[in-house]
Image: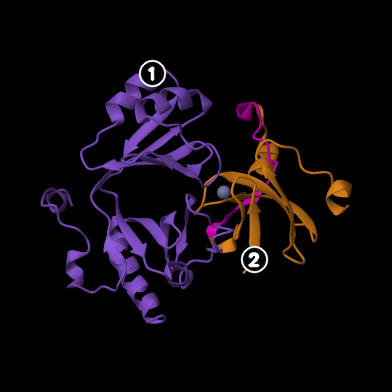
Chain colours: A orange, B purple
């Protein structure tokens, strides 16, 4: 079983977690001023990288908090997890 | 549901005595889910008589009342049946943003107290229940087989389990099945 480190609870089994989509998607400050294309971009368009991907995860059956994770989509390895509101960890720092 | 509760019936009555050594229903409890940030810590401590746990997955308490850390701003308060805390909490916390929700009848308690309790639980729970990884006083929401539980270790071989009422029958049967592996 995959072990995911919750930033609040520590390492926990993957069955306690739920995936929450791509991380760091900021909701537009003034949605009503946005054109259809920009709104579509915000609402539907997501990155689908091969490699490191910043994602939202939720420790659903634990502390129930959302947090962010850097996961390698080719190996399923969780490279880093960090609390919501914190910046995406520096790649070089993570790899070191 | 309300008349079932009013009659004092538990989900275990339909099990026709199905049991195993060390497995029992916990006494009736009053339960609250308390949510709030740092501003509620001092007033809540005054009402409870002890401080809320702020370390992840830890419980604090006195003889009668206990507070279990569920999340960074969420606690499960357990006290004897009839020990109502909601009004006192709301009065003490005042205008600081918070919520107190009574969940006494949403869930029931199960106690597992036997020398191989950790091994029996490991049949359905993926957590590391070694004493070093899950010491006495640790508590957490987690999964047992297909049901979510709150698991709280109150002794080396004693676990208190809180489970949603409608899953209690399933959990009980699963624990008896798990125990059979160690008979
Ligand atoms: Zn957590």
Residue B71 placement (x, y as % from top left): 51, 42
The residue at the far top in this view is: B95
Check disc 1 and report its element: helix, strand or loop: loop
Q: Nearer the viewer, residue A94 or B40?
A: B40
Residue B10 placement (x, y as % from top left): 19, 58
Q: Residues within 10 Å of mark 1 (few under 14, many from 20)?
A: few
How far separated are the C-alphas under marks 2 and 1? Answer: 43 Å
> Left of B118 or right of it: where is A83?
right
Please report the residue visible at 40 percent of the width from the left and 35 percent of the height from the top.
Answer: B34
Residue A70 visible to the viewer: yes
Residue A33 placement (x, y as % from top left): 65, 26
Query: Decide: marks 2, 1 in contact (CB < 8 A)?
Result: no
Residue B56's place in the image compared with B179, above or below, is above
Please check the rendered image and state whether residue B10 is part of the magenta-colored stretch, yes or no.
Answer: no
Check disc 2 and report its element: helix, strand or loop: loop
Query: Magenta segment range?
Result: A16-32
Residue B94 is tagged as 1
Please report the residue visible at 65 percent of the width from the left and 39 percent of the height from the top.
Answer: A84
Q: Label 1 lies in what chain?
A: B
Please report the residue visible at 77 percent of the width from the left and 66 percent of the height from the top.
Answer: A74
| Location of residue B19 (image quadrant) | bottom left
Please report the residue visible at 44 percent of the width from the left and 68 percent of the height from the top.
Answer: B121
Residue A30's place in the image compared with B30, above or below, is above
Q: Label 2 lies in what chain?
A: A
Residue A81 placement (x, y as % from top left): 70, 49
Please check the rendered image and state whether residue A29 is part of the magenta-colored stretch, yes or no.
Answer: yes
> Left of A45 or right of it: where is B13?
left
Check the picture and name the quadrant holding the C terminus of chain B: bottom left
| Location of residue A15 (image quadrant) | bottom right
Q: Nearer the viewer, residue B19 or B5?
A: B19
Q: Nearer the viewer, residue B47 or B93?
A: B47
Residue A2 is tagged as 2
């Amino acid at each position: 079983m995959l072990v995911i480190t919750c930033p609040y609870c520590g390492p926990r089994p993957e069955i306690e977690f739920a995936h929450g989509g791509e991380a760091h998607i900021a909701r537009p400050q003034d949605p009503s001023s946005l054109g259809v294309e920009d709104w579509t971009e915000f609402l539907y368009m997501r990155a689908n990288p091969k490699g490191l991907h910043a994602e939202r995860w939720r420790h659903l059956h634990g502390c129930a908090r959302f947090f962010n994770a850097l996961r390698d989509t080719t190996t399923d390895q969780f490279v880093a997890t960090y609390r919501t509101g914190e910046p995406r960890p520096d790649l070089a720092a993570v790899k070191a | 549901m309300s008349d079932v509760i009013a009659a004092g019936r538990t989900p275990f009555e339909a099990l026709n005595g199905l049991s195993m050594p060390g497995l029992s229903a916990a006494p009736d409890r009053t339960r609250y889910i308390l949510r709030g940030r740092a501003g509620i810590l001092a007033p809540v401590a005054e009402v409870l008589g002890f401080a809320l746990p702020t370390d992840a997955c830890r419980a604090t308490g006195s003889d009668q009342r206990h507070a279990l850390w569920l999340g960074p701003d969420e606690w499960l308060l357990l006290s004897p049946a009839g020990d109502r805390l909601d009004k006192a909490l709301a009065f003490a916390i005042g205008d600081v943003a918070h919520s107190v929700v009574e969940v006494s009848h949403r869930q029931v308690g199960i106690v597992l107290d036997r020398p191989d309790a950790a091994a029996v639980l490991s049949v359905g729970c993926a957590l590391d229940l070694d004493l070093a990884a899950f010491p006495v006083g640790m508590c957490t929401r987690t999964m047992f087989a297909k049901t979510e539980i709150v698991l709280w270790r109150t002794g080396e071989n004693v676990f208190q389990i809180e489970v949603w009422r409608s899953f209690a029958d399933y959990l009980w049967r699963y624990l008896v099945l798990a125990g059979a592996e160690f008979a």
